[in-house]
Amino acid sequence: MRLIALGFLIALSFSTLIMRAHAQPAPSAQKPPARPVPPTRDPDTPGYVKATALPDGANPPANTDGNFILGPTHNPAPEVSAQPGVPQGVISTFTMNSADSKFYPGIARDPGILGTPDPNDPTKLMVTTSHPAPYTRRVTVYVPKQYAPGTVAPFIVGADGPDSTLFAALDGLIAEHKVPVMIAISISNGGGDAQGSERGLEYDTMSGRYAEFVEQEVLPQVESQAHVKLSKDPDDRATMGGSSGGSCALIMAWYHPELYHRVLTYSGTYINQQWPHSDESPHGAWEFPEHLIPNSPVKPLRIWMEVGDKDLFNPNVMRDGMHDWVLANENTARVLAAKGYHYQFVFARNAGHVDHAVKQQTLPEALEYVWHGYSAKNQ
């Protein structure tokens, strides 16, 4: 009997192994397709702006308008690393919940397919998987050691926070008296990316809504939580961001120039990515070079902007001719020059989208440029 039982167990184990060998693996969750590798663009391409090529490793002068080409080497500027004897600012954080916001109660897009182009209009993307969803965001506040409590301070608002590179750069630049003693407010987004997401709604919408959200819901908490006083003067205020956070920085100042005069962007998403569609700005931030800047009176803005030679190109299903980040930034630089704006545009060789090495090289100079001509009122 024992031999029979043992034989039965061996047969059963062998059958189980065969079944497992032929079993199909469980289907995995659908992943979004990988972004195509962007082509490397030549800054001398016909139609691009004429630009001054700098020696490898050099940055443009911080007091000079115009177009510049830098790279291919990108060494970090000294200011982005902690330096002996340089006072370091105090960093604090607080959180904000979507349930408390009258501007952004929260949305999210299901993972997987972004959407499908409208068959009747390829410039529109149909998104059917976006729905209400809660979020929690973090706000990180940098207060320099040199800030005098109780005084009114200039400040910079940054997207996709926290931004440790910005905080480090401000430590060095403030100590060198190259920028004013300013507060930095680094706001995280509400989650996701592009059409149908909370981040996309906040950053890619062509309106004054995000600036109003910051003004009414974020800045009062910054003052109370970090025990600072923030200036109301638009000349004392700057915006900053990369990718959609970069287009958001320009959107904030464009629609509310009474709030912000200084803008700093890396790989700005000046493309057709707004969702939901708006008849007032049907091509999203592509409208900046296409219509808004050339057809509007000059606004009191000072703008620094960068794009990489390997920046994004048709990264999703849209094929509307308005998804080339390099061309979008080149066109924006061209119309800024034609309108007589104070701006500096950097084309970075050997650089991708919101390239970290480029940011480490250029951010101190970019901050100097954006704050050039600032007249301290309370310092």
Image (cartoon, rainbow, N blue to C red):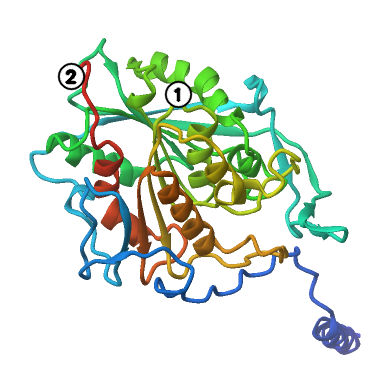
The secondary element bearing badge 2 is classed as loop
Q: Quadrant of the N terminus?
A: bottom right
Numbered disc total: 2
Q: Does residue 84 appear left or right of residue 168 in this picture?
A: left
Q: Nearer the viewer, residue 231 or 220?
A: 231
Residue 155 point in image, percent of width and height: 34, 27
Where is the C terminus found, in terms of image quarters?
A: top left
Q: Residue furthest top?
A: 150
Given contact means CB atoms under 8 Å apart, are the residues at marks 2 and 1 in contact? no
Within the image, what quadrant is residue 349 found in? bottom left
Q: At x 56% / y 23%, what residue is drawn?
A: 212
Residue at (37, 72) in percent of width and height = 350
Q: Amino acid at mark 2?
A: Gln
Please give the name of the residue rendered at 80% of the width and 85% of the height, measured from the top-left corner: 21
Where 193 sits versus 46, above or below?
above
Q: Which residue is mark 1?
A: 259
Q: Residues within 10 Å of mark 2 (few under 14, many from 20)?
A: few
Residue 338 at x, y percent in the picture: 44, 50
Label 1: how many Cα within 10 Å (few below 14, some 14–19, many 20+) = many
Judging by the rendered image, the residue that carries numbered circle 2 is 379
Residue at horizontal 87 percent and vertical 88 percent from the top: 11
Residue nearest the observer in this picture, 218 or 327: 327
